Amino acid sequence: MSTKINERLSNHVADLAAVFFKLHDYHWHVRGPRFKTIHELTESYYDDINEVLDAVAERLVQRGGVAPASLKTYMDKTKIAVPEKGSYTDEEVVAGVKADFEYLLKEFKETRRLAAEEDDAATDNLFADYITDLEKKIWMLRATLG
């Protein structure tokens, strides 16, 4: 099996873990008039990300790889910036989540393209669903930002 796909899956695990933790930071520290809405939204997002993280890690293991599973490895591998401000406005959260989801979307599309080239239908199909979900979430976040 392609080591290139396994490396991408490993990077996705790290990126998804970073987004998972970042969403918790936003969830706990958002402030402003849309607190309740953003608090609930980030909770639904980190629940979704947790499921994707698990499925991607399992796919990596199915392909003979080793899924990263430590905070240090996640932080060494991820390209997701993880600020810790202690407080975020509702607009900062929406813009930050949108940017992270756009990054994941771009990366997932590349993995799907590579999987299709290598006739890895399982990985291709897995990411097709995630791409659809991210595109819808990004559309809604854009609409929220105006």
Image (spheres, rainbow, N blue to C red):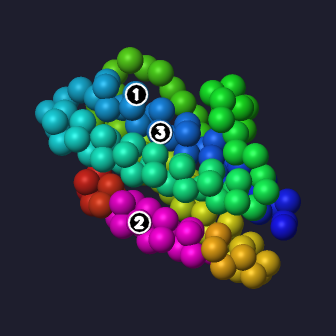
For label 1, count other residues whose C-alpha is less than 10 Å away and answer few (under 14), some (14-19) or many (20+): many
The chief SS type of the magenta part is helix
Q: What quarter of the picture does the N terminus occupy? A: bottom right
From the image, tell me which residue sits under label 3. Answer: 20
Q: Residues within 10 Å of mark 2 (few under 14, many from 20)?
A: few
Q: Give the alpha-carbon distance from disc 3 to disc 1, as whole Å.
A: 9 Å
Mark 1 residue type: Asp
Does the segment drawn in magenta span residue 72? no
The amino acid type, in three-letter code, at marker 2 is: Asp
Q: Position of residue 58 (x, y in %)?
A: 62, 54
**In which quadrant will I find the C terminus?**
bottom left
Where residue 138 sits in the image (x, y, percent)?
A: 39, 60
Q: Residue at x 44, y 62 (%)?
A: 134
State the residue in front, 88 or 18: 18
Q: Secondary structure at mark 1?
A: helix
User: Which portion, as a residue range, is magenta?
Assistant: 124-139
Q: Residues within 10 Å of mark 3 (few under 14, many from 20)?
A: many
Rendering coords of residue 14 (x, y %): 64, 42
Depicted 99 relative to depicted 84: above or below: below
Q: Give the residue number, with chain letter if any, for mark 1.
A: 25
| Figure check: 33 above or below 44 | above
- Tell me which amino acid carries mark 3: Phe
Residue 53 image label: none
Which residue position holds label 2? 133
Distance between mark 1 and mark 2 Cα atoms: 22 Å
